Image: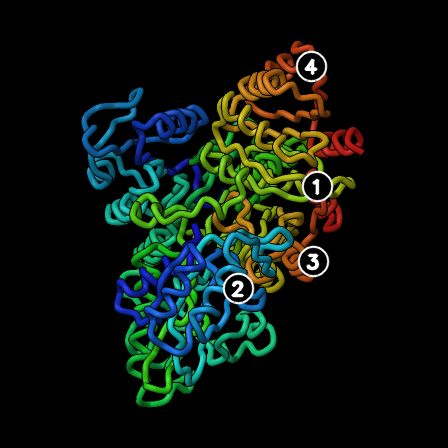
Amino acid sequence: MKLHEYQAKEQFRAVGLATPTGVVVTEAADAAKAYIQLEGDLAVVKAQIHAGGRGKAGGVKLVRSADEAQQVAESLLGKPLVTIQNAPDGTIVNQLLVEEGLPIEKEYYAAVVLDRQVETPVLMASAEGGMDIEEVAATNPDAILREPIDPTRGLSAFRARRLAFGLGVPKQLVRPFASTLMQLARVFLNTDASLVEVNPLVTTTDGRVVCLDGKLSLDDNALYRHKDLVALRDESEEDPTELRARKNGLSYVKLDGNIGCLVNGAGLAMATMDIIKHHGGEPANFLDVGGSASTEQVTTAFSIILEDPNVKGILVNIFGGIMRCDVVAQGVVDATKALGLEDPLVVRLHGTNMKEGKAILEQSGLKIVPADNMTDAAQKIVELTS
Amino acid sequence: MSILVDKNTRVLTQGITGEYGKMHTLACRAYGTNVVAGVTPGKGGTDVEGIPVFDTVDGAVAETGANTTMIFVPAAFAADAVEEALDAGIELVVCITEGIPALDEVRMKHLVNAAGARMVGPNCPGVISPGEQCKVGIMPGDIHMAGSIGVVSRSGTLTYEAVWQLTELGLGQSTCIGIGGDPVIGTTHTDALALFQEDPQTEAIVMIGEIGGTAEEEAAQFVKEHVTKPVVGFVAGATAPPGKRMGHAGAIIAGGKGTAAEKKEAMRAAGIVVAESPADMGSAMQQALRTVGA
């Protein structure tokens, strides 16, 4: 789950991190008031959407008067902002963060992620703030420094200092800089984050270390112990179909093809997409119905797949270990009837009560094409949809 | 011979009185596994179809000599269950539970390493050694066949698919391990390959990966340097878009890294026979065995 910048900064401030003073507004007139309230010559108006790349897309603007703040706000609010991450449709901007401008001395980059290789969270930092970290990683990997974070105790002070010295932070700022890094690690652990990112993290000419930006993504598996953070979820940012799938316990990702897939298990679901492509088709989605899908869940899964107007046929691939094939078959038949499905449907069932499952499909009187294995299934659905 | 589990494995189930835990524990026993105990705090003194239930893991171990645990407790309690098992001296933890917070998994892994124990999973189907009639997990036993192929995979049902293909071709299995689809797991591909390489019964290995992380690349490097047995590979997710999590918490292409193409390339460079279609995992093994004249 992703949070907005202003929400991330609330979490930052909760552990003592410095952020610019700011006001969240939803009306252009309030942006002008916010500018006056901030009492500086310079302010920044920032579109609050989840997608990254806002700056380059024109979603972050400097303003020098209340009028300008209002104009910029009017140009952003209620309109889609298309960035490199949410193209081609973009995301409608509903909220703006108006912040004080700061006298920036230097920009750095800092992030906390789970490093799968060392199996612990790590703090990554670079002196090339403001740049896309993936670009830095590709062109100048040595510029990125890393230190492991103890999952219980946090980032050790000496590691934080080592990072600060390594980045060439001026001596008089090493202490506040290191403590900023330790606090970012604390945010990651406290919120069960999957990503904490500050780009840029700045030092100012008046000797402060401030999180100019803030990104915070949470581990979905840990949300049960963060009810306060779950309340911050912005569902308008989510794909409506993916949202509906999630609420029904299904894992769904929309793709660009025309063959819908309904599979049990994430690995097999990916493999099913792959084999469709291997035989010349294009999968329309990833959909894992889970290990113990009920008849209702299969029906919901079908309706979710069919929400995509590109879908011209569906491939069901079930390898029943826990799942009984007769239950799945009944679900497929019920869903087909309930939804009046007319597109081609190829079903491959394997496992417990396979024969009973196939019999249910055959006796249904529906045009369901049975398949014996994955190759057979993929070839049949590709042929029927081309 | 086999790896991890065999006739001498004495299994206890943590979370045996839940619907899921009970069903699978009984299926394991029916397969031939020596299930000696179950643990559910507060249900000690009762039994599940003759399997004695204890309040604590150390109580169960003291009474029954269990050396392996199969964990079905809900995700919120899984880290605690692992710690309890390790504290009681359990050597092998098979954690079936899915949806465990990543930071809990980091802590679990550190505890397992500190105890000198081994963990399979979490979020996995478990381990089965068909020749030893020992199944510690949720996989359907009847698709397996005793033999000499080792199988290691991040997936559940895709592993069943691979095993079924092998069995259809008359290629039995020594041990099949589902290592789990999460970012931090106990036994890795590389760990499993090392065990299979040492196991005299295992003659060849199927390794199934998926997008996300670099575990497959590391395993391929290990194959290149240490594995003398034929290895067949498949990587799921060639059609997955970047930046999207594909069901498994660990299955995500991040920053352009972790793609199926990279992993397959690393496998090929290590001499692994890569199946291009998931339907060809069994036949790729046939081909690999023919090449070495086995």
Q: Contact, CB < 8 Å: mark 2 with mark 4?
A: no
Front-most of residues B28 and A230: A230
| Chain letter belonging to callout 2 | A
Callouts 2 and 4 on one subunit: yes
Question: What distance separates the C-alpha of mark 2 from that of mark 4?
Answer: 52 Å
Residue ID for mark 2: A59
Residue ID for mark 3: B268
Q: Residue at x 32, y 35 (%)?
A: B12
Q: Secondary structure at mark 1?
A: loop
Residue A112 appears in the picture as rendered: no
Residue ID for mark 4: A366
Question: What amino acid is labelled 3 in the image?
Answer: Arg
Front-most of residues A264 and B152: A264
Question: What amino acid is labelled 4 in the image?
Answer: Leu
The mark nearer the N terminus, 4 or 1, is: 1
Residue ID for mark 1: A257
Q: Residue B42, which numbered label?
A: none
The mark nearer the N terminus, 2 or 1, is: 2
Q: Is residue B286 left or right of residue A25?
A: right
Callouts 1 and 3 on one subunit: no
The mark nearer the N terminus, 2 or 4, is: 2
Callouts 2 and 1 on one subunit: yes
Q: Secondary structure at mark 2?
A: loop
| Chain letter belonging to callout 3 | B
Question: What distance separates the C-alpha of mark 3 from that of mark 4?
Answer: 44 Å
Question: What distance separates the C-alpha of mark 3 from that of mark 2?
Answer: 44 Å
Q: Residue at x 66, y 9 (%)?
A: A363
| Chain letter belonging to callout 1 | A
Q: Return the x and y of residue A350 as percentages of the image width and height.
A: 61, 25
Residue B52 appears in the picture as rendered: yes
